[in-house]
Image (cartoon, rainbow, N blue to C red):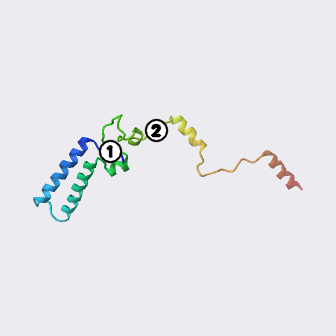
C-alpha cells in the first residue's frame, strides 16, 4: 500500500490519541464511551505510525505532499477525478431529442398503403 498521510495529519492524530488516552486514564471518560475512545486512539496511533489510512485509500484521499522522486506518493489520477467537459445547452436539447423517451408514436401511414386499402374496400 502507498502511504497517504502527511506529517501534519500524523501529528494531529497522535495529539488526539494522547489526549483521549489521558482523559480515559484520568477517569473523565468512562463506560462504553471509554472503550470507543480507546479504540479510536489506538487506530489513530497505528495509522499515524504506519503512514497509511485505509479510509483515505477507499476515498482516494492523500494528505501527503507530492515527492516526484518517491514511489510512495499517489498518482494525481488517484487523488482527484478527471474533469468533466460541459456541453452547451443547445447541444443538450438537440441530444435529448435524439434519445428515446419511452413513447414511440406510430409511424405515419404510407401513401402507397392507403391506395391499397381503398382498392380492397371497393372489391
Q: Residue at x 12, y 59 (%)?
A: 25
Question: In terms of sequence position, does the residue under pointer 2 or pointer 1 come before the other?
Answer: 1
**Image location of residue 22, percent across then percent down:** 13, 55
Q: Which label belongs to residue 58?
A: none
Residue bearing the label numbered 2: 84
Q: Residue at x 33, y 35 (%)?
A: 67
Q: Residue at x 60, y 42 (%)?
A: 98
**Image location of residue 10, percent across then percent down:** 24, 45
Dot 1 falls on a residue whose secondary structure is loop
Q: How many marks?
A: 2
Q: Which class describes the residues within 10 Å of circle 2: few (<14), some (14-19), or many (20+)? A: few
Residue at the extreme bottom? 31
Residue bearing the label numbered 1: 4
Dot 2 falls on a residue whose secondary structure is loop
**Image location of residue 107, percent across then percent down:** 70, 48
Q: Is residue 95 visible?
A: yes
Image quadrant for the C terminus?
bottom right
**Image location of residue 52, percent across then percent down:** 31, 48
Viewer-nearest residue: 14 or 104:
14
Q: Which class describes the residues within 10 Å of circle 1: few (<14), some (14-19), or many (20+)? A: many
Q: Residue at x 29, y 44 (%)?
A: 5
Residue at the extreme right? 123
Give left or right: position of 46 versus 56: left
Distance from disc 2 to disc 1, alpha carbons, whole Å, reads 25 Å
Amino acid at each position: 500500500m502507498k502511504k497517504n498521510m502527511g506529517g501534519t495529519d500524523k501529528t494531529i492524530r497522535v495529539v488526539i490519541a494522547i489526549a483521549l488516552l489521558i482523559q480515559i486514564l484520568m477517569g473523565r471518560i468512562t463506560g462504553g464511551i471509554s472503550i470507543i475512545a480507546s479504540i479510536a486512539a489506538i487506530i489513530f496511533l497505528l495509522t499515524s505510525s504506519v503512514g497509511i489510512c485505509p479510509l483515505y485509500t477507499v476515498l482516494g484521499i492523500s494528505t501527503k505532499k507530492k515527492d516526484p522522486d518517491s514511489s510512495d506518493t499517489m498518482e494525481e489520477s488517484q487523488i482527484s477525478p478527471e474533469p468533466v467537459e460541459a456541453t452547451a445547452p443547445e447541444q443538450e436539447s438537440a441530444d435529448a431529442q435524439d434519445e428515446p423517451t419511452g413513447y414511440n408514436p406510430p409511424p405515419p401511414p404510407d401513401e402507397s398503403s392507403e391506395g391499397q386499402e381503398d382498392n380492397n374496400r371497393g372489391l
